[in-house]
Amino acid sequence: MATMDVISIEFQKHGEKTTIHLLAFSLLIAIISSCTTDTTSFETDISVPVSVTDIKTGSIEQYVNTTGSVNAMQEVALSSEIIGDYYLLKNPRTGRLFVLGDKVKAGQKIIRLENIEYENSIKIESEKLNLDISKREFEKQESLFDKGGVTLRELKNSEREYINAQYAYENAKIQLDKMDIKASFNGVIVNLPYYTKGTRINSGSEMVTIMNFSQVFMEISLPEKDMAQINISDRAKITNYTLPNDTLIGKITQLSPAIDPTTRTFKGLLVIDNKKLLLRPGMFVRADIVVDKKENTIVIPKDIILSKQRGKTVFVVERGAASERIITTGLESATEVEVLKGLKKDERLIISGFETLRNRSKVKVVR
């Protein structure tokens, strides 16, 4: 309104027209310039809060990932070989009858099958006595042969009788052992079908299943493209969702040289050390097979890298401003990436608040 008043006076006072007009124009320019300067100053003073970390060197591993179920390295299902009356034995470690989950040692008796008729037919004591007699007779014939008292034929016949008696006695012991169900190796009872005490059990009935899973194995199928970079003895990191804080180590022990034409994959076997029994047979696990590793290299978080037309971009702090860097990357893991070019050790890398930054944006480090 003040400007309009000045302009109306200009038309009334022709002699002062030029002077008054220039004064009004200068005043208008000064006001606009003042507003612009204030706005620019306000915008320039804005600093984006960011978090930073000092760039250090470290190690990084690159993986090929696969999943599958683990199985016990040793497993056996024991069945009855004879007909007999069922008797579950006591576990000497607990003082009670064996139950699921009990640990057993190789050769330990778990179940006894009683059958008097079968036991008598073995004639174990008779076979033992016959062995003793045959042994003594053979030793006597050897002594006489040395003195010329018997012929070679008589000595050999005596030796044959002794050998046959040994076979007969060993055979009898084998047959007698079938009455006891014993653990084949150190392990854990994982299946124990219930039978009433004294029940007559038929031959071939399932008695007990034992597993040893201090080592487990995993059958894997890998993409054809990974065949060149995976080798026998490669390490693998094994994880399971029920064990978030535990990582076990496995090793590839077998690899098939053939590709399945249907799935375009090749098979392998991964053996996992499981001494603490953290993994249980049948568990579904993830295996990260280590195919490459670097030491003393710059490693940064993978999730701070921005993909732009010019390439992969990150920001570092230089003199209170964000400096855009185009980087060249190398090995990658699930969460980290190796930087080959574009960053230097001890620079301050922006790890939070970088999403809206531009090159030379003012920043405020809040760590």
Image (cartoon, rainbow, N blue to C red):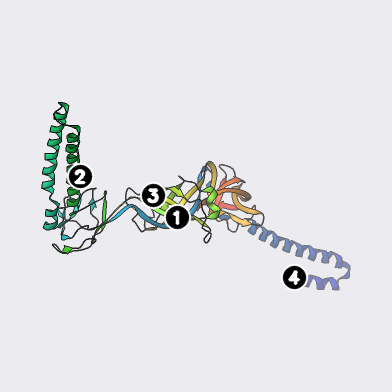
301, 278: nearer the viewer: 278
The residue singled out by tag 4 in the image is 2
Q: Return the residue found at the far right.
A: 15
Q: Of callouts 1 and 4, which one flags the residue occurring earlier in the amino acid sequence?
A: 4
The residue singled out by tag 3 in the image is 272
Work out whether residue 51 can be spotted.
no
**Residue 213 x/y as whole percent:** 32, 51
SS at mark 2 in the image: helix
The residue singled out by tag 2 in the image is 167
Location of the N terminus (image quadrant): bottom right
- Within 10 Å of disc 3 (Cα), the crowding (few <14, some 14-19, many 20+) is many
Between the C-alphas of marks 3 and 4, the distance is: 89 Å
Kind of residue indicated by mark 1: Ile
Between the C-alphas of marks 3 and 2, the distance is: 43 Å
- Within 10 Å of disc 2 (Cα), the crowding (few <14, some 14-19, many 20+) is some
Q: Of callouts 2 and 1, which one flags the residue occurring earlier in the amino acid sequence?
A: 2
Residue at 43% across, 50% down: 237
Q: Of callouts 3 and 4, which one flags the residue occurring earlier in the amino acid sequence?
A: 4
Between the C-alphas of marks 3 and 1, the distance is: 13 Å
Work out whether residue 102 can be spotted.
yes
Q: Are marks 3 and 4 in contact (CB under 8 Å)?
A: no
Kind of residue indicated by mark 2: Tyr
SS at mark 3 in the image: strand
In the figure, residue 36 lies in which quadrant? bottom right
Kind of residue indicated by mark 3: Ile
Q: Please state the total of marks drawn on the protein image.
A: 4
Residue at 13% across, 46% down: 127
SS at mark 1 in the image: strand
Between the C-alphas of marks 1 and 4, the distance is: 86 Å
Kind of residue indicated by mark 4: Ala
Instruction: Name the side, left or right, on which 43 lies relative to 184.
Output: right
